[in-house]
Amino acid sequence: MKNSEIRALTIDELKSKIHGEKEALQKLKFARAVSPIENPMKIRESKKLIARLNTALSQKELENA
């Protein structure tokens, strides 16, 4: 997901995306613990996406405050 796409989202959409990505990260971590996963870089990408979403969310909340 590109930064321009992230900036276009609303606060509620950002919160739902963060929640979904955190669940996906948990599933990836569990899959890695059970057996080797096909692409371990997905975990890093997921963490970075969550961080970008959190940053965009905090910026939007500051703008609205």
Image (tube, rainbow, N blue to C red):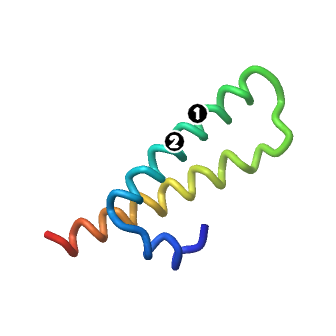
Q: Residue furthest bottom?
A: 4
Q: Residue at x 55, y 58 (%)?
A: 49
- Which quadrant holds the C terminus? bottom left
The secondary structure type at the circle numbered 1 is helix
Q: Residues within 10 Å of mark 1 (few under 14, many from 20)?
A: few
Quadrant for the N terminus, please: bottom right
Write the residue at 51% across / 41% down. 22
Give percent across and percent down for residue 13.
40, 59
Is residue 26 placed above or below 16 in the rendered structure? Answer: above
Residue 29 position within the rendered picture, expressed as x and y whole percent measured from the top left: 65, 32
User: How many numbered discs sit on the rendered protein?
Assistant: 2
Location of residue 28 (image quadrant): top right
Q: Is residue 45 left or right of residue 37?
A: left
Residue farthest toward the left in the current orientation of the protein: 65
| Element type where label 2 sits in the image | helix
Amino acid type shown at disc 1: Gln
Residue 58 vs residue 11, the one in the foreground: 11
Foreground pick, 19 / 38: 19
Along the horizontal axis of the image, is 38 left or right of 12?
Answer: right
Q: Residue under label 2, please give it.
A: 22
**Disc 1: which residue:** 26
**Could you say where residue 40 lies in the image, as x and y percent from the top left?**
77, 43
**Hey, what amino acid is under mark 2?**
Lys
The span from disc 2 to disc 1 (Cα, nearest Å) is: 6 Å
User: Percent x, y for residue 18?
Assistant: 45, 50
Q: Which numbered marker is on residue 40? A: none
- Residues at badges 2 and 1 in contact (C-beta under 8 Å)? yes
| Residue at horizontal 29 percent and vertical 70 percent from the top | 60
Taking 51 as reference, is 65 above or below it? below
